[in-house]
Amino acid sequence: MKKYFANKSFLIGFCIIAFFLLLTFLGFFYLPYEADFTDTSNKFASFSTKHLLGTDHLGRDVFSRILVGIRISFGIGLTVMIFGCISGFLLGSISGYFGGITDTIIQKLVTVQMSFPGILLALMLIAVFGSNTKITLLALCIMSVPRFTRITRSSFMKHKNALFVKAARSRGASHLRIMLIHILPNILPEILVTCALSFALAILSESGLSYLGLGIRPPAPSFGRMLNDAQRFIFRNPVGVLVPAICLSSMVTAFNLLADGIMECETSKR
């Protein structure tokens, strides 16, 4: 960790993420207004002590909506990352370690899934089951699995015949122990990088779907939905567009910097 924090990319990304996490925790304990509270008599209000970031076209407090929007983005990103990591690790480790017909079947399934662009798959599911948060989350989770599966598979194939694995096998270690105790720690950096990139992609994809009106349903304040609502009034109220756009781009950039920092540190070790 000392080496990670000595890396500028990792440190900058970590600080930005820590800042947004603080705002997330703040939103649990303090919200100036309800995120969907409207006051049309006070629309397009400028910065003030009552409204730190002003109000939108319906008189909703932008700061309160940003706090809830950050919470939603982190929740979706974390859920997608955990689902993809667990599912992809299980499939990739079995595929890479055992090989044979099992590897062939899993890779064929992954290839078929990857043949569909992620957004197209999400649109197909939404068209069949309707637009709601659960369907959006399901689509994003399915999109994240192949990336983890391929990374894990290639890493297991690289290490399964290593000397330390052969030594553990000669001492009678079980397959599960070899996979979790001996191989997993050696591929952890690759998985962490994939987790960071998957988190960023999930946030970006959800915002894109919400911008098109196919993601998080209103009045939940997703960044994409906020951008869609504010674009009609960009010249009258530019803050309504700039604030969610800056938050979204900052979060995505932070996770990419985190991934870059981990890769740079691991590359320097080799």
Image (cartoon, rainbow, N blue to C red):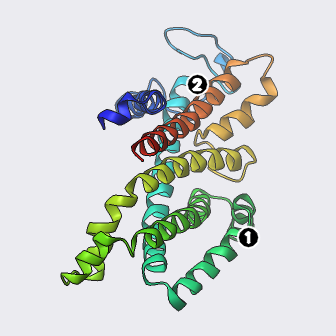
Residue lying at 29% horizontally and 74% vertically, measured from the top left: 178
Spatial CA distance of label 1 from label 2 is: 39 Å
Q: Residues within 10 Å of mark 1 (few under 14, many from 20)?
A: few
Residue 33 is marked as: none
- Can residue 261 be seen from the camera position used here? yes
Tell me the mark number nearer the camera, choosing from 1 and 2.
1
Q: Is 130 situated above or below 239?
A: below
Residue lying at 57% horizontally and 64% vertically, measured from the top left: 138
Q: What amino acid is labelled 1 in the image?
A: Ser
Q: Which residue is mark 1?
A: 115
| Residue 68 rendering spot, x and y as whole percentages | 50, 36
Q: Earlier in the sequence, mark 1 or mark 2?
A: 2
Q: Which residue is mark 2?
A: 62
Residue lying at 67% horizontally and 74% vertically, measured from the top left: 111
Indicate left or right for 249 with 181 as reference: right
Q: Under tag 2, what secondary structure?
A: helix
Q: What amino acid is labelled 2 in the image?
A: Val
Q: Residues within 10 Å of mark 2 (few under 14, many from 20)?
A: many
In front: 65, or 249?
A: 249
Indicate left or right for 179 with 119 as reference: left
Residue lying at 66% horizontally and 34% vertically, measured from the top left: 226
| Residue 199 rendering spot, x and y as whole percentages | 52, 48
Q: Is 154 situated above or below 198?
A: below
| Residue 122 rendering spot, x and y as whole percentages | 69, 62
